[in-house]
Structure formats: C-alpha cells, structure tokens
Image: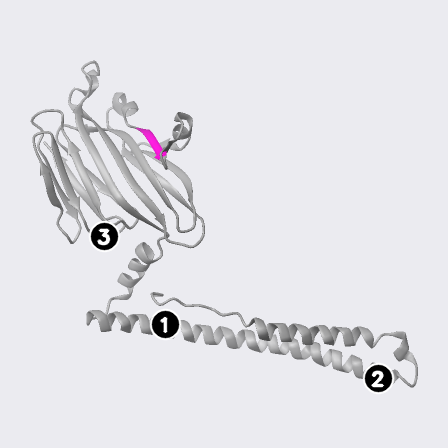
C-alpha cells in the first residue's frame, strides 16, 4: 500500500571510500610481488604489503556482505513501517480501516496508472442501414466517435495502447459493417493500411490496438470513429479502461421514434443536459475509475 512514497538514497560517499580502500589493497598485493621486495633487507616490507593487501580485500568483502544484509533488513523494516503509516493515515482521515483487498485494487487501478484521460466525449449516432442493405432491415448502423486527451503522469516517456473494441453482429452478412474507420493521433490520421494492420477479429469482437508514445509529462489528443451493428431494441455499455475526469455522452437519433435513456454505473448520477427529438446529451462530471461505465439503451 505505498501511498507514501518510499525512496532509497544510495550511499555514494561510503562506497567511494570502500573503493579507494580496495584499490589500495590491490596495489599493495601487486607491489608485494615486486622484484625489489625479494631481497633480504626488503623482504619484510614485501610481506607486510602482502598481509595488508589481503587484510584490506577481506575487510572490504566482509563490509559489503554485512552491509548488504543490514540494508535489506532496514529496508524491509522501513517498508513495513510505511505500510502501517499508510493504513493508519486512512483511518485518521476516514475514521475507518480500509480492507487490504480494496487498498490493493485502488493501488493497481488508480495509483499505479501512468496515464490519465481528460475531455472525454463520446458521440453515438443511431441510424438506419441504407435501403439496399437487405440484411440490415431489422438493425441499426451506429457510429461511435470518441475524443479525449491522454496525459502522461510520469517524468519519463511511456508507451500506451489506444484500444477500440466492437461487438460482432450475429448475422455474417453484417460483419463487414463493424469496423474502425478513423483514428487520429494529435490530429494526424492513421492510414487505412495502419488501421487494418492494428485491427484483429474474433468470433465475438473486432479489436483495434495501436501503440503510441507519450513524452514525459506530455499529452496526446485522440480521435476515433467506429461503426457498429445493433438491434432495433438494444443497449450499449461504454466503459473506461483508465482513470478519467468524466465523460460527456451525446446520442443522436436521425431515425424517428427512437427513445434513448442512459445511466451511469457509478456512485454519482449522470446529468441529462440536453433532450430533444433528435439529440440527447448526458454528462458525468466526476472522476471515473477503470471499468466504471455508462449504459444507454433505446427502443
């Protein structure tokens, strides 16, 4: 539960001293084998250099060994202390203990996230298929456009996957209409070939996955447009995979007599800000955890 940051300060000063002592010990060992110390009157000095050199090497090995185990023990004790402080800190603030599994989930989903999404807007259009598409007579051809900004929360460049997942329709004749049509990264569109390369299909979904780089403390603007096949009476769940500051949902219904409703799978209620015969807009102006969602349905 590392909500208080744990840091390690390398002991560069001591390590430098140890390195100097080791270097001197090695020099003494080498010097003890010099020809000048093979003579009777200097042999004692040679033996002394050899013993001092051996003693220095052994001492450094012992010091490093003892210090390694001591540091590991102290770091373990410090980590345990930080965990207790974090645990008691939340108790002091909220007057209750938060269970360990909940702590772990919050840390994994939010505290360790390297990116944050802002200005998230989803425009979803529900329309009829063209008349010549016979198989689509009992279905809607929907488009989903998303716009948002990704912020790098770290002080180094990171890689992030831009992902779009679309449900495959049951009728094989309608599968080609389910596709990712446009992806823009900082207003630069990917080519048709790049989109096709990044798209895969299974029996249940179409997935687009494209890796981008976000500079340290930088932001990237994303715009996607996809097409889906939905039933005349159907629903959509739009979930976030990364922490966000909110979501604005606009559902357009050029097709007449389509009624749309929405709700948020969230502790806060979604606000219905625009309602007319062709357009509905809802806003969830609150922080969104990964996999919280907005559900909307029509008939």
Reading the image, the residue beneath label 1 is 82
Front residue of 99/151: it is: 151
**Left or right, 181 with reference to 295:** right
Residue that appears at 70% across and 76% down: 57
Which quadrant would the N terminus be assigned to in this image?
A: bottom left
For residue 116, above or below residue 65: above
Look at the image and give the residue range highlighted in magenta.
180-184
Most extreme residue toward the top is: 132
- In the image, is residue 299 above or below residue 102? above
Mark 2 nearby-residue class (10 Å; few <14, some 14–19, many ≥20): some
- Where residue 246 sits in the image (x, y, percent)? 22, 47
The earlier-in-sequence mark between 2 and 3 is 2
Which sits earlier in the primary sequence, circle 1 or circle 2?
2
Residue bearing the label numbered 2: 45
User: Does dot 2 land on a helix, a strand or a loop?
Assistant: helix
Find residue 28 and report its horizontal and vertical position in percent. 78, 77
183 w.r.t. 60: above or below:
above
Q: Which mark is residue 287?
A: 3
Image quadrant containing the C terminus: top left
Residue 8, position as x, y percentages in the image:
47, 69
Q: How many labels does the image show?
A: 3
Magenta region includes residue 181: yes
Label 1 environment density (alpha carbons within 10 Å; few <14, some 14–19, many ≥20): some
Q: Residue 137 has which mark?
A: none
């Amino acid at each position: 539960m590392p909500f208080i940051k744990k840091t390690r300060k390398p002991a560069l000063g001591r390590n430098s001293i140890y390195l100097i002592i080791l270097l001197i010990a090695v020099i003494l060992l080498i010097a003890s084998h010099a020809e000048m110390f093979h003579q009777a009157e200097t042999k004692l000095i040679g033996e002394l250099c050899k013993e001092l050199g051996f003693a220095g090497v052994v001492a450094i090995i012992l010091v490093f060994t003892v210090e390694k185990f001591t540091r590991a023990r102290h770091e373990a004790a410090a980590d345990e202390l930080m965990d207790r402080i974090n645990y008691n800190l939340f108790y002091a603030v909220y007057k209750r203990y938060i269970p360990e599994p909940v702590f772990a989930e919050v840390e994994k989903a939010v505290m360790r996230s390297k990116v944050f999404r802002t200005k998230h807007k989803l425009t979803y259009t529900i329309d009829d298929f063209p008349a010549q598409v016979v198989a689509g007579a009992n279905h809607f051809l929907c488009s989903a456009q998303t716009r948002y900004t990704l912020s790098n929360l770290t002080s180094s460049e990171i890689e992030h996957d831009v992902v779009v997942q679309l449900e495959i329709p049951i009728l094989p004749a309608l599968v080609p209409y389910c596709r990712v049509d446009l992806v823009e990264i900082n207003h630069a569109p990917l080519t048709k070939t790049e989109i096709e390369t990044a798209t895969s299909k299974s029996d249940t979904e179409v997935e687009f996955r494209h890796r981008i780089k976000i500079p340290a403390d930088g932001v990237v603007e994303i715009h996607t447009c996809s097409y889906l096949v939905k039933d005349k009476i159907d629903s959509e769940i739009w979930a976030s995979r990364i922490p966000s500051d909110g979501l604005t949902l606009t559902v357009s219904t050029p097709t007449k007599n389509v009624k749309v409703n929405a709700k948020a799978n969230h502790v806060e209620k979604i606000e219905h800000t625009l309602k007319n015969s062709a357009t509905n807009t809802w806003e969830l102006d609150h922080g969104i955890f990964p996999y919280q969602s907005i559900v909307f349905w029509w008939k």
